[in-house]
Image (cartoon, rainbow, N blue to C red):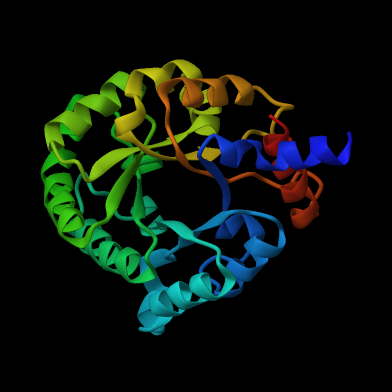
């Protein structure tokens, strides 16, 4: 590959309005300030920050969200989302504590200037039945009102196929609630073809993407190129965040490999 081709490959996603980021936990720096500079050093465009179980790191250090925002400005690396992992333990479909943690997460996301708070619905907190999807609508409406006031988007990451996820969004009826789409989960966890789902959900109702697979990107079951083609077709722009594993055990080398693959497409 010539130098010109290398530069073109590096710039290709940006030319399509896409930024390539990473979630802090993949770098084994969950909720750590140094994750910002590390993501920058590894060549990423942006970062997703984990709030920690019970939002504990941010409760122990009341200034941590503002420190993240300051570090983001210092390194010129945008924070594009927060991830409230407590929602694996407390479920929005049934637990009042989940609503309280999520409301706090909205405030922390605003303070970090991260824009998006990813809400997760997996395992015992998945929305498997119509009754559960009905039950989650009221708390999501309440949180969406708070998010609208805060200027934060709520990312709805779940195990639902596109049509069912859209029905939840319709029940809530807020511009602050959008789908956070994970092409790895869709392919390997709940059996949906990402390229078809991306077209069905549409540009205006997707806030961000997670990209991952079992193993390295481009070498597993996930059709990454088809997903990117669908993203281009609907005219979506924003952040694609890597939530990849480390098959070799060398985290930085594996991240570099996955990032180079994405930039080559």
Q: Give the side of residue 76 with respect to residue 91, left or right.
A: right
The residue positioned 15% from the left and 41% from the top of the image is 174
Considering depth in this image, is 231 or 9 the residue closer to the camera? 9
Quarter of the figure with residue 46: bottom right
Task: Please identify the residue farthest to the right as the structure is shown.
Answer: 2
Q: Is residue 215 visible?
A: no
Q: Give the side of residue 40 with respect to residue 173, left or right.
A: right
Q: Quadrant of the C terminus?
A: top right
Task: Using the image, determine if residue 39 lies above or below residue 198.
Answer: below
The residue positioned 60% from the left and 37% from the top of the image is 13
Quarter of the figure with residue 261: top right
The residue positioned 61% from the left and 26% from the top of the image is 224
Count of numbered labels shown in the rendering: 0
Q: Position of residue 225 (x, y in %)?
A: 62, 23
Q: Position of residue 57 (x, y in %)?
A: 44, 76
Q: Give the side of residue 258 with respect to residue 63, left or right.
A: right
Quarter of the figure with residue 218: top right
Q: Give the side of residue 64 with respect to residue 128, left or right.
A: right
Q: Position of residue 43 (x, y in %)?
A: 69, 55
Considering depth in this image, is 38 or 29 the residue closer to the camera? 38
Task: Using the image, determine if residue 230 lies above or below residue 5.
Answer: above
The residue positioned 29% from the left and 28% from the top of the image is 165
Q: Is residue 199 visible?
A: yes
Q: Quadrant of the N terminus?
A: top right
């Amino acid at each position: 590959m010539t130098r010109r081709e290398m530069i073109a490959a590096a710039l290709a996603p940006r030319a399509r309005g896409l930024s390539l980021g990473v979630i802090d936990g993949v770098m084994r720096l969950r909720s750590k300030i140094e994750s910002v500079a590390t993501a920058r050093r590894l060549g990423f465009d942006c970062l997703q920050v984990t709030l920690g179980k019970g939002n504990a790191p941010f409760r122990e250090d009341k200034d941590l969200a503002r420190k993240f925002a300051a570090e983001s400005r210092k390194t010129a690396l945008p924070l594009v989302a927060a991830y409230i992992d407590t929602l694996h333990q407390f479920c929005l479909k049934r637990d009042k504590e989940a609503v309280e943690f999520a409301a706090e997460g909205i405030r922390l996301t605003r303070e970090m200037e991260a824009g998006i708070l990813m809400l997760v619905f997996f395992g015992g907190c998945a929305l498997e039945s119509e009754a559960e999807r009905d039950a989650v609508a009221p708390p999501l409406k309440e949180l969406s009102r708070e998010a609208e006031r805060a200027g934060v988007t709520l990312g709805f990451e779940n195990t639902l196929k596109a049509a069912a996820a859209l029905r939840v969004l319709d029940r809530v009826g807020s511009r602050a609630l959008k789908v956070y789409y994970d092409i790895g989960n869709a392919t390997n966890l709940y059996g949906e073809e990402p390229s078809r789902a991306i077209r069905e959900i549409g540009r205006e109702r997707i806030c961000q993407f997670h990209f991952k697979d079992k193993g390295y990107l481009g070498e597993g079951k996930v059709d990454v190129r088809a997903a990117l083609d669908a993203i281009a077709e609907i005219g979506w722009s924003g952040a694609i965040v890597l939530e990849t594993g480390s098959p070799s055990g060398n985290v930085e080398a594996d991240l570099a490999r996955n990032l180079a693959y994405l930039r080559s497409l």
